[in-house]
Image: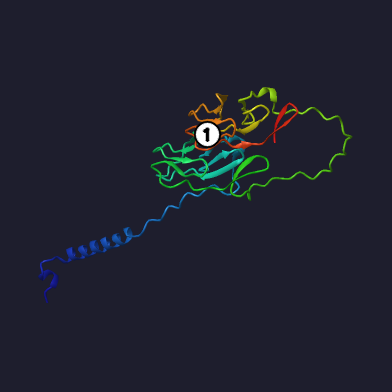
Amino acid sequence: MADDTRAQGVPRRTAVAGAVMIAGATAGCARYAEPAAETPPTSAAAEGTVLGAAADVPVGGGTVFADQKIVVTQPAKGEFKGFSAVCTHTGCVVAKVADGTINCGCHGSKFAVADGSVKNGPAAKPLPAQEVTVTADGKLTTGGGGGAQTTEPPAEEPPAEKPPADKPPVQGLASTKDIPVGGGKVFEKEQVVVTQPVEGEFKAFSATCTHAGCAVNAVQGGTINCPCHGSKFEIADGSVRTGPAGKPLGLRGVKVEGDQITLA
């Protein structure tokens, strides 16, 4: 009986080779159809990671910790906020904190130091908040502080009370004679400005401008003046006289003992 393959004009060897090629192609398709393994997302720094010293974060500004991909700001004195340092536009790590905003160097996005909200696009989403803690020894750590342990010194008995001595003279912030009537004085170290709107009435305000966190530098012409963008505030109540600032200066407590002015 004649071979069917030969009768059809196809050599047997060719038919077998074709079958092998088809089988190999089928196996190859099955292999390349398998999904690729997903790359796990980059995780944040572990809780309790020490970032640096709280004293290195300026009031009204902030510091970028690029290795941990976290940025820490201090919108007001003693108030620390943490955010992811990964820009929500294309995932670049933000470059710096300046002029009251967290700034990305890739496409110019800017975020508010107070809450991470978008101040300037193209980013459309705020920076995610990251919990940070200031330890008893002034260190900034990630998380709620569970991983940052501080050792408390053993309690010591209070020293024996000494007999009262003559009360030393009060050493205040300034003398009442240092504050001109209708003017004031800026105390850079204490970050406070003291004014005397009318004779015998003393007021104190935060020296941090509410526009971009610059320090005011002078009291002239009946106003407290910021050199950065020209904002001016009333010496009587700290309210805005001239923008671009939109909020008044924060009020600080002050008292007068004799001829000395001290912060309350």
Horizontal and vertical percent position of residue 232: 52, 30
Amino acid bearing label 1: Val
Compare residues 193 and 71 and report the one nearer the observer.
Answer: 193
Neighbor class of circle 1 (other Cα within 10 Å; few <14, some 14-19, many 20+) is: many
Can you name the residue that lies furthest to the front here? 198
Colour theme: rainbow
Residue shown at 13% from the left, 66% from the top:
10
Is residue 1 depicted above or below 179 in this figure? below
Horizontal and vertical percent position of residue 220: 56, 23
- The C terminus, quarter of image: top right
Q: Which residue is mark 1?
A: 240
Residue shown at 87% from the left, 31% from the top:
165
Can you name the residue that lies furthest to the bottom here? 1
- The N terminus, quarter of image: bottom left
Is residue 48 depicted above or below 17 in this figure? above
Residue shown at 67% from the left, 47% from the top:
149
Is residue 29 depicted above or below 95 in this figure? below
Choose top left, top right, bottom left or bottom right for residue 80.
Answer: top right
Compare residues 118 and 55 and report the one nearer the observer.
Answer: 118
Horizontal and vertical percent position of residue 256: 72, 31
